[in-house]
Image: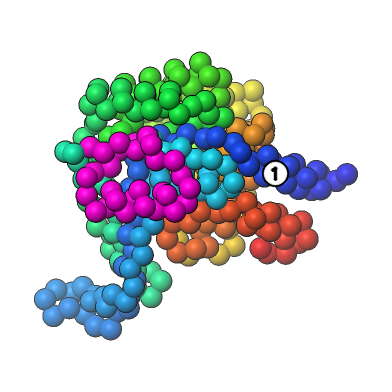
Amino acid sequence: MSAKDKLFRTERQIIDKLSGRRLAVIGDSMVDRFLWGRVDRISPEAPVPVVRVEQETVKLGGAANVAANIRALGAEAFLFGICGPDEAGRQLRGLLHERGIDDSGLLECPSRPTTIKTRIIAHNQQVVRADREEDAPIGEALVGQLSACLTATGPFDGIIFSDYGKGVLTDAALGLFIAAGRKAGVPMVVDPKKGDFSQYHGVTSLTPNQKEAEQACALPIVDGESLALAGSRLLERTAAEAVLITRGEHGMALFHQDGRDGHLATRATTVFDVTGAGDTVIAVYTAALSAGAEFLDAAQLANHAAGLAVRELGTAAITADQLRTALTARQGGEEA
């Protein structure tokens, strides 16, 4: 069997094992609101385009979009975080219920609004984004409630920390949840956003993009040598087993404690929108690890999924069938 055939068979087997996996997603949930329209003129009030809105759509965002991607793969998703007592919070829960995502761990916080990211799109291009949010760290009481919900809903086959810096994943919360995950012996993967990543010490793996890796290491990544140095620093700082750095058009780079590094070329042949691509990566990567996949095989599968996600405008949840189709097309030398 050729290496290509072996990879295809391995990836198909991983996808088949995803059904029934139970994954917890802990982090910052939000509503992604899209206003679609067209531009016919410039405003007489200021040199800005006037967008005539023709359609509005609402989707799951942040940690909720990670959960949606997990559910689309056929696994079970359990979401833990907070929302506000507002219309956006009701929309968030409604969208979760539509997808069959357990929201019993999504706690209502009376003092905070549900995070909303509103994007105005004209002629398939984003014109502007407006955010409504409160990003102060949540208090000890909410952290304790989330921990109790996590314990009551488990056990899980994997845990994802979706950190958008909106206040849910405080240092205290991360310490508590990581300790619980290590005790359970399940893979824990974090999509990091803040600091030098030392607060994620003890997770199984991380999936920063290149900019986040550069900021965490205070190191510009300009070539293979600086990329490898960044990967080495992050492994040392977090004691993770592997770090997967996503690099946009340059693909991904996987760094492993045992030195089995891997560089994956991008699978994106057409890019319409990178919104939510990182959510797709961490969802597929962690789901694959929870099904027993090796880090490189999980990264290969996540790379394929990301290539599909960026072809769609707005946040997208890639299904298991879409992944199977893409793999089959690659095997036959075609573009999915």
* Kind of residue sitting beneath label 1: Asp
Q: Quadrant of the C terminus?
A: bottom right
Q: Is residue 65 visible?
A: yes
Instruction: Tell me the residue that label 1 is attached to.
Output: 16
Q: Could you tell me which residue is drawn at 22 percent across and 26 percent down?
A: 139
Up-down relation of residue 204 to residue 129 (above or below): above
Up-down relation of residue 9 to residue 55 (above or below): above
Viewer-side residue, 1 vs 151: 151
The residue stretch that appears in magenta: 81-109
Viewer-side residue, 52 vs 225: 52
Q: Could you tell me which residue is drawn at 21 percent across and 35 percent down?
A: 136
Left-right relation of 193 to 334: left
Decide whether residue 90 is among the magenta residues.
yes
Numbered disc total: 1
Left-right relation of 257 to 99: right
Spot occupied by residue 20 in the image (x, y as percentages of width and height): 61, 38
Decide whether residue 71 is among the magenta residues.
no
Left-right relation of 233 to 36: right
Q: Could you tell me which residue is drawn at 36 percent across and 23 percent down?
A: 148
How are the colours assigned in the image? rainbow
Spot occupied by residue 54 in the image (x, y as percentages of width and height): 32, 77
Direction left: furthest residue: 45
Viewer-side residue, 68 vs 205: 68
Badge 1 marks a residue whose secondary structure is: helix
